[in-house]
Image (cartoon, rainbow, N blue to C red):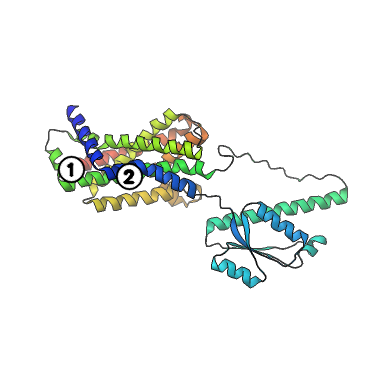
Amino acid sequence: MRRLRALLIKEFIQMRRDRLTFAMMIGLPIVQLLVFGFAINTDVKHLPTAVYDQSMQQDSRDFLAALTASEYFDVTQVATSHEEVAAAVESGKTKVGVIIPPDFAENLKHGRSAAVQVIVDASDSMAASSAISAAQLVGQIKSQEIMIKRLQGVTGKKVDPPFDVRIRPWYNPDFVTAFYMVPGILGIVLTMTMVMITSMAIVRERERGTLEQLIVTPMKTWELMLGKIIPYIVVGYVQATVALLVGIVVFDLPVRGSLGLLYLLTSWFIIASLALGVLISTLAKTQMQAMQMSFFIFLPSVLLSGFMFPRESMPLLFNWLGTLLPLTFYLQILRGIILKGVGISVLWTQILALTLFTTVVLAIAIKKFQKKIA
C-alpha cells in the first residue's frame, strides 16, 4: 500500500504540474454544457417562411395565422409569384414556402377541398420534418374545425369529434431539450476525458521514459495500473459533480431519482471508460496514435449511443454496434435516474452490461499491459 500511495501522490503532483490539461479536464464540462445545452435544440421552430397568398381572403389569412401561431413558421417574406417563392427557398433565405391558390376561399365556401402547397427545404431533414409535421397538424385542425361547423349547421346540435386522443407526456412534459441533452453531454464529457486523456497520459509517460523507471521499481503490475487509474476516477467524479451542478443551476435540470445511486453507477462507467483508455494505451506507440484511436471510439459513442439520435430508428446492425459502447448503457442510466427517477430494479440490465464490458476490456488491458512491461 505504501508503494501505491507513493505512486498516487506522484500522479496527483504530475497532474497539478500539467495545468493546461488539468484546467481542460475541469473546465471542459462547464464549457460543453453551456454551449451545447443552449445551442442544441431538437424541436426546430421559427422557420423562416415565404408566403404567396393569391386568394387574399379572410380564410387564407386565418390559415396563415394558424401556421404562425404554431410557432414553427415565421413569415419573413411575402412573395408575389411562384418564382419568387422558389428563389427564396433555393437561396436559403427561407426554409419553407407556402402558396395559396386564388380559388382557396371559393372552394371552402362551396364545400370543396381547398389545396395549399407547402414547399420545404428538405436538405435539412430535421427542420423539414418539423415543418411538415406542423403544417399537416395545422391542416388537420383547420379541417376538423370546418367539418364540425358544417355538421352543427346541418344538425343544429353540438358535434364532438369521433376520436378524443388525450396525450400525457411523462418525465419531460414541456419537451425541454436541455433536460434530454444535459445528461447526454455529461456522458460525452466523461467518455472524452476518461478514454482520450488516460490513453494519451500513459503513452506520454512511455515516450518520456518515466514508465520504464516505474517498471524497474518493486511495484507490482496491479499497483501500477491502480496508480494510473485512481487519479482519473477522482477527476471523473469532479467532472460529474461540476456537470450536474451546472445542469441543475443553469438549466433547472430535475433530479428525480437517487443521487447516491447515480454516483455509484457513475463509477461503473468511469472504470469501463478507463479500462478502454488503458487498452488503447497498450496498443498505441505514440500520443498521436492514442488520440486517433480514441476518436475511433469517441465518434461512434456520439452517433450510435442515443446521445443525439434515437437508437430505435437505426438499422439493426448499427443498433447492435451501439450495444458494444459503454456510453449507450450509461446514458440510459443517467436519463433513467435523472428524468424518470427509476432504480436498480429497472436499470439492472444496463448495470450488467457495463459490468460485463468492464470485466472483458479490463482483463484484455491488464494482459496486454503485462506483456508491454515484460
Picture coordinates of residue 54, whole percent (x, y): 72, 67
Q: Residue type at mark 1?
A: Lys
Tell me, yes or no, if residue 72 can be seen here.
yes
| Element type at mark 1 | helix
Q: Is residue 230 above or below residue 279?
A: above
Q: Is residue 150 left or right of residue 84?
A: right
Query: Looking at the rendered structure, which numbered label has been put on residue 24?
Result: 2
Q: In the drawing, does residue 185 fall left or right of residue 68?
A: left
Q: Is label 2 in a helix, a strand or a loop?
A: helix
User: For this rendering, which residue is in front, 314 or 267?
Assistant: 267
Labels 1 and 2: the sequence-earlier one: 2
Is any atom of residue 352 visible in this view?
A: no
Question: What residue do we see at 73% from left, 53% from top?
Answer: 142
> Dot 2: within a 10 Å radius of its alpha carbon, few (fewer than 14), some, or many (20 or more) residues?
few
Residue at 59%, 67% (x, y): give it. Answer: 88
Tell me where residue 294 appears, x and y as whole percent: 31, 49
Type of amino acid under label 2: Met
Q: Which quarter of the picture shows residue 95?
A: bottom right
Q: Nearer the viewer, mark 1 or mark 2?
A: 2
Q: Quadrant of the C terminus?
A: top left
Q: CA distance from mark 1 to mark 2?
A: 32 Å
Name the residue that disc number 1 marks: 371
Residue for point 79% across, 50% down: 148
Crowding at mark 1 (Cα within 10 Å: few <14, some 14-19, many 20+)? few
The quarter of the picture where residue 190 lies is: top left
Label drawn at residue 312: none
Work out whether residue 336 or residue 238 is closer to the camera in this orientation and state it: 238
